[in-house]
Image (cartoon, grey):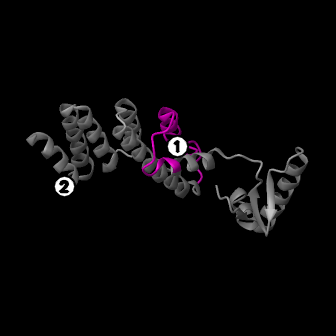
Amino acid sequence: MHTSGVYRGAAAERLWPDCSPTRASANLRTALCHGRRAGPLTTVECVDRRLRLAPVVEVDLHRARCRAQDAIGDRRSPEDPEDLAATFGEELLPEWPDEWLEVERERWDQLRLHALEGLAQRLRRDGEYLAALQTALTATQIDPFRETAHRILIEIHIAEGNRACAMKCYKEYQRLLRRELAVDPSPLMTRLVEDLTSA
């Protein structure tokens, strides 16, 4: 996860939490030794008492983070928005129960939400409504309570001329918030649909 690497002692404790620090360190030395003998390329480097992946190792999460950073901001729409939205729709190691992943998952979720929302707004601006809707819907599935994604979804329906669909989205989101959190959508979102009904 960390491009700067992790201290050997911390890595040993995470990998062998039930062992003493001495035993965990010995296990780590053995694992690194086996790793060096496994093939012609070194996959784990030791630099200044830190372990890190060698540059020859490609990590899909690092690539996805770079794509997410590119998707954030006011750039032109990508060549293949569906592929990009599918990449951002992926959870981080969903089957792994490890506690240390919780912060990494939250970090990835926030990055991909911002990327999906930025991408949906650009697609709407460029008139690619279907791709924009699918992208915004992916964001609402990641975090059903996040207002930004729902607001973008409503804006896409409005831009496409589907006022009834926009109002339906608002009402469904309002019901969700009232039922689960006992709150209402923000004034910003409410003004969006008020403008719609008064138009």
Res. 149 visible in picture: yes
Give the image quarter of residue 64: top right
**Quarter of the image containing the C terminus?**
top left
**Quarter of the image containing the N terminus?**
bottom right
Give the image quarter of residue 47: bottom right
Main SS type for the magenta part?
A: loop
Judged from the image, the secondary structure of the residue bearing numbered disc 2 is helix
| Label 1 with label 2: CB-CB less than 8 Å | no
Crowd class of label 2 (few under 14; some 14 to 19; many from 20; radius 10 Å): few
Residue 187: image location, x then y, percent = 19, 55
Mark 2 is on which residue type?
Pro
Q: Is residue 38 left or right of residue 170?
A: right
Residue 128: image location, x then y, percent = 37, 32
**Tag 1 residue:** 91
Closer-to-camera residue (170/55)? 55
Q: Is residue 102 left or right of residue 159?
A: right
Which of the two discs, 1 and 2, labels the residue nearer the N terminus?
1
Judged from the image, the secondary structure of the residue bearing numbered disc 1 is loop
**Tag 2 residue:** 187
Q: Which residues are magenta?
A: 70-98
